[in-house]
Image (cartoon, helix red, strand yellow):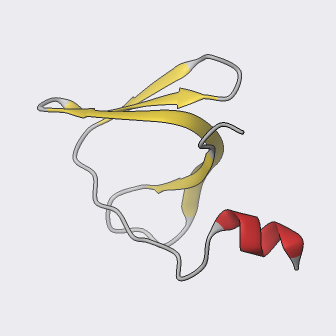
């Protein structure tokens, strides 16, 4: 199984999600991060921060 992540992006200083996507690869570099989506498209994000869920996505799906 691939290491697939569900990522939600927000606009700066807003609490409303901008986009939620399924990501199969995340690459970080000095210009930001590159998210490779499940369909092969890429999204480039700069000026970002991140938070972690307290439980994995697998556990959420099983409930």
The location of residue 40, given as percent across then percent down, is: 63, 17
Is residue 6 positioned above or below 24 on the image?
A: below
Q: Quadrant of residue 17?
A: bottom right
Image quadrant holding the C terminus, namely bottom right
Q: Residue at x 34, y 63 (%)?
A: 50
**Left or right of 6: which side holds 60?**
right
Q: Quadrant of residue 16?
A: bottom right
The location of residue 11, given as percent across then percent down, is: 41, 55
**Left or right of 48: which side holds 30?**
left
Question: Quick one: 17 or 39, which is closer to the camera?
Answer: 39
Q: Quadrant of residue 8?
A: bottom right
Task: State the residue lying farthest toward the top.
Answer: 40
Is residue 43 positioned above or below 12 on the image?
A: above
**Left or right of 46: which side holds 40?**
right
Task: State the residue lying farthest toward the front.
Answer: 1
Question: Quick one: 58 or 19, which is closer to the camera?
Answer: 58
Image quadrant holding the N terminus, namely top right
Is residue 12 positioned above or below 24 on the image?
A: below
Is residue 54 positioned above or below 47 on the image?
A: below
How many tags in the picture?
Answer: 0
The location of residue 48, given as percent across then percent down, is: 28, 52
Q: Residue at x 26, y 39 (%)?
A: 46
Q: Residue at x 44, y 71 (%)?
A: 52
Q: Residue at x 53, y 82 (%)?
A: 54
Task: State the residue lying farthest toward the right.
Answer: 63
């Amino acid at each position: 199984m691939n290491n697939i992540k569900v990522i939600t992006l927000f606009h700066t200083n807003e609490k409303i999600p901008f986009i939620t996507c399924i990501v199969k690869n995340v690459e970080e570099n000095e210009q930001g991060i590159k998210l490779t989506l499940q369909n092969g498209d890429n999204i480039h994000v700069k000026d970002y921060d991140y938070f972690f869920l307290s439980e994995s996505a697998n556990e959420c799906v099983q409930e």
